[in-house]
Amino acid sequence: MTLRIYRAKAALKHDLGAEHPESPDRLYAIDDQLLASGLDMVCEHADARPLAREYLSLAHAPDYVEEIMNLAPESGSYWLDGDTGMVPATLSAALQSAGAGCQAVDWVMAGDDRQAFCVTRPPGHHAEYDRAMGFCIFNNVAIAARYALQTYQLKRVAIVDFDVHHGNGTEQIVAGDQRILLCSSFQHPFYPHSGSPVLASNILSVPLAAGCSGEEFRQQVAHWLPALRHFQPELILISAGFDGHAEDPMAHLRLTTADYQWISRELRAVADACCHGRIVSVLEGGYNLSALGRSVVAHLRGLSGQSEATAAD
């Protein structure tokens, strides 16, 4: 096993209240399932460090970064929009979440056959160039992609986003950047009501109707695989959202843990063929705690190349 898990300690203190679905309990649920599955014992572990401020501008407007720094509350809460809030621990959590993605890039680029998973929050794929939204403040995966391109002089990086909600921020930030291929699946029409049509030729979108089954999901996203192999990425980044699970209350797809294991194993095969197995995966959505934990286990098993026999619900 060459899989390393990055955790952001401040993320456990980023708490917007008992009614908010994007809660610290998500991380506890994941850790519980990693322990129960035995994966926690065979993976490597590392603590996320906050990302240096200058790297945030790889994906965000400097004025926006300055605004977030200034708005971070010392007490109480501050709401950037109706869904996206900040409490005193939020800025540290967001900086550690962005930092985890870049640390993971450093680690996977330092050797062959390495995969990393960032168990961090707040998530990132809704954060646009100059706007927070959808629980997201900094776009962790877009920052990591640009960091990899800049730091390692890569020519091609792929981002795969299978969250049930369209990663509008990621698409906005990378649209037209031909060094990046973004493959995205999402329920449509649905929040944030974007993604189709795509913004640029480097975007491959798979809009899915409410009620979509795992079989249909597999048929649709299988079109990514030859496109990814043709692109020949030197690194694959994943926005791993698990809110498409049939038990998740936030949307209306009918995926199972086996579907997450399947797509993860398929992406691992592409990475083996194109970029020495190098994958960095970053947690996005997933709000039914039991389904989230089980789906993450399936995802990591898929990234390690295991078959679906171990994930059937």
Image (spheres, rainbow, N blue to C red):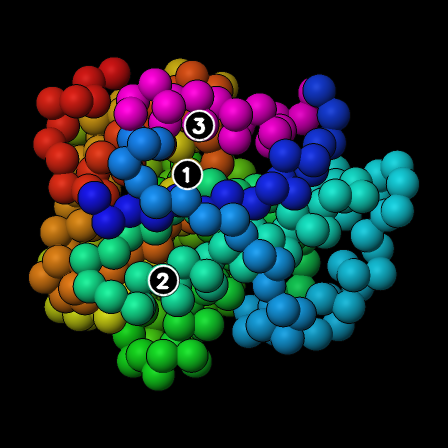
Residue identified by numbered label 3 = 30
Identity of the residue furthest to the right in this view? 75
Q: CA distance from mark 1 to mark 3?
A: 13 Å
The mark nearer the N terminus, 1 or 3, is 3
Depth order, front residue of 125/96? 96
**Mark 2 Cα shell of 10 Å, populated few (<14), some (14-19), many (≥20):** some
Q: Nearer the viewer, mark 3 or mark 2?
A: 2
Circles 1 and 3: CB distance less than 8 Å?
no
Residue 180 sits in quarter: bottom left
**Mark 3 Cα shell of 10 Å, populated few (<14), some (14-19), many (≥20):** many
Circles 3 and 2: CB distance less than 8 Å?
no
Q: CA distance from mark 3 to mark 2?
A: 22 Å
Is residue 65 shown left or right of residue 190?
A: right
Give, as a three-letter code, the residue at label 1: Gly
The mark nearer the N terminus, 3 or 2, is 3
What numbered label is drawn on residue 67?
none
Q: What secondary structure is marked by label 3?
A: helix
**Mark 1 Cα shell of 10 Å, populated few (<14), some (14-19), many (≥20):** many
Depth order, front residue of 11/290? 11
Q: Residue at x 70, y 74 (%)?
A: 62
Q: What secondary structure is marked by label 2?
A: helix
- Find residue 53 and report its horizontal and vertical position in percent: 66, 70
Q: Nearer the viewer, mark 1 or mark 3?
A: 3
- Residue 28 magenta-drawn? yes
What numbered label is drawn on residue 107?
2
Give, as a three-letter code, the residue at label 2: Trp
Range of the magenta residues?
A: 19-38
Give, as a three-letter code, the residue at label 3: Ile
What numbered label is drawn on residue 241?
1
Q: Residue at x 60, y 63 (%)?
A: 51
- Find residue 72 and report its horizontal and vertical position in percent: 81, 52
Q: Residue at x 37, y 23 (%)?
A: 35
